[in-house]
Amino acid sequence: MSTVTTMADKMIRSASRALAGSRLTRRSFFARTAVLGSALTIDPVGFATKPVSAYAAVCGDAANCSDGFSVFCCTITKGGNFCPDGTFLAGWWKADNSGFCCGGPRYYLDCNAVCGSGWSCHCEDSPDTCDHRHISCNQFRYGQCHTEIACYGPVVCRLVTCTPPWAFDPSCTSSSASDQSTVSHTAPCLPGDCPSDLVLRWYDLGGPAGFLGAQAASDRPIAGGSWLELTDGAIFKNQAQGIHYTQGHLFSVMKRLGGPQKTGVPTQDDASCSDGIGRYNVLVRMKGATAVLTSVYWSPVAGSGSVKGLIRDHWVAANFENGRYGYPTTDTLLTSDGTSRYVKFAKVVDAKVASRGAIYSSPVAGTWGVHGAIFKHFKTLGYENGALGYPTSDVHRTTDGEGHLATFAKVTDGSIVDRAVIYSHPVTGTFSVHGAVLTAWQTSGAEAGPLGYPTSDQRRTTDRAAVYNTFATVVSGAVRRPGAIYAHPTFGTRAVSGSILKSWSGLNGEAGALGYPTADEASGSVGAVAYRSQDFEHGVIVTSSVGRGATMWGSLAAAYATSGGPAGPYGLPLGSQVDVAGSWSCDFQGGNLTVSA
């Protein structure tokens, strides 16, 4: 232990003995030596050479209730440089050449009692502070702030700032009043001699007892400026952006993203979203001559997230959180294949999540977003890792204006290898189509064609040899004319619909007597009777007004085809083939065909 005693040590010991008098307790000793330490820090020369007490050196002149001045707000709020509850900012004055503001003006802002708030006149009297001035005793108002409030009570306390009042609070005017006798007034909970711009802004926002919390570190340099970290936020000074803060959940997002060294600095103070629910800020980092922007968001409904790059551009074009995507619920993340990025979102309506969505940015598929029922279905199919791949369009309306769709594509080795769609209709539901089935369906006119909207996702047949989707048209809000498209590696991709589909399904479809369709539907007429027909692996279905959905298979179907089918002597079938005493028989316009074992 050093035996050297500094002048400061001697002064503290001597003065603390004088302050303590004959009744010195451990608590009062530390409290009083703390005051003396502050005095030496703030005014060491004045304290050592002038007949001034330590209390006066810390608090300035007129620090007692008998002097008639109003107490500082930070004294009664336990460190907070803000107007307490039941008061409002009513007016201001200044003292020029203040050492507390680096020789510039120091502004004093009065917090007057709200009428009926119950504040009463008394003096601050606490062992924790030397600011023993008036509380709610001076019935006075300068009147440059919140002039819309006509009724007011006495001055409860006063704020201090080096920021011009009209910049501190937009309700204040620039009409000036001065009182040089207050130039030395201060209290231990206010910043000391000529603090940094960051510390001054911190005290403007409430100081240690404000929403940013206590100081967690000294000012630190950052590209283009400096920053001050606090227990619940940070304040940043940047040559291009000025001085701004971020706090709470938004500051947590910044730290999650790697801190200001990675994200850059705020371009504004944290702000409320237009719905009054969430909060946001925009961060900027310079990458060479390019400004990289990151929007950080939080709401109690959607949680927190951040958006940047091409995804942010797409989201901004859709009107930020007010658009179809809503609030980000994740940061900008890398996809599992490492080639692309995405952000998930939630649309908030009436303080509830109304729908969810995502925006993807792929160097091959582009930057597009999906939301609502289509996003929900995309999720059930495994997102971009599923059968559909990446979105290649936004969600948009169908040609008839009744449904919505979005397009997708699988990306392999930097190339698109398969395309897909998801359609959503209030009657038929939300389903996907891709591959050969999609090509055939689009060739037929997609939802505007004879098959209408998909009513299933792509499925495998029972023998696993083919895939198919079911479809249906919608007329006056009701499902009409069901259909299906089957894709088989041998028999090709064929559509089956209407009464032909009904008859084929009645025979257990591709697993039944007819097998897979081998040709597209054909049409013709026999005399005045029109018909439609379709060939299958083991037979044929002919439907007309004389025999709806007539079905033939096996040897009887082969015999009918050999005879020329509907154009032959038998004409159109009057019904399906039936088993008659162990033989297959079918009646036609021109006679009967029977095939026995």
Image (cartoon, helix red, strand yellow):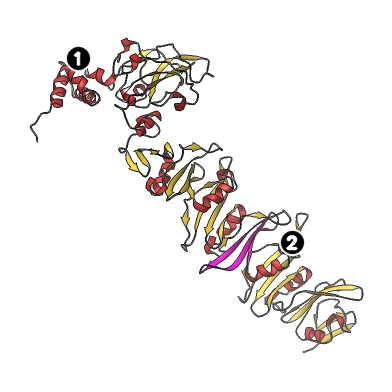
Q: Quadrant of residue 379?
A: bottom right
Q: Earlier in the sequence, mark 2 or mark 1?
A: 1
Residue at point 31% right, 22% down? 187
Spatial CA span between label 2 and label 1: 96 Å
Residue at point 52% right, 18% down? 147
Residue 211 screen position, x and y as percent = 40, 33
Residue at point 68% right, 79% down? 491
Of the pair 301 and 12, the residue shown nearer to us? 12
87 sits left or right of 521 in the view: left
Q: Which residues are magenta?
A: 404-433
* Badge 1 amino acid: Pro
Q: Give the label on residue 448, or none.
A: 2
446 sits left or right of 54 in the view: right
Q: Give the label on residue 51, or none.
A: 1
Vertically, is 51 above or below 128?
above
Of the pair 405 and 8, the residue shown nearer to us? 8
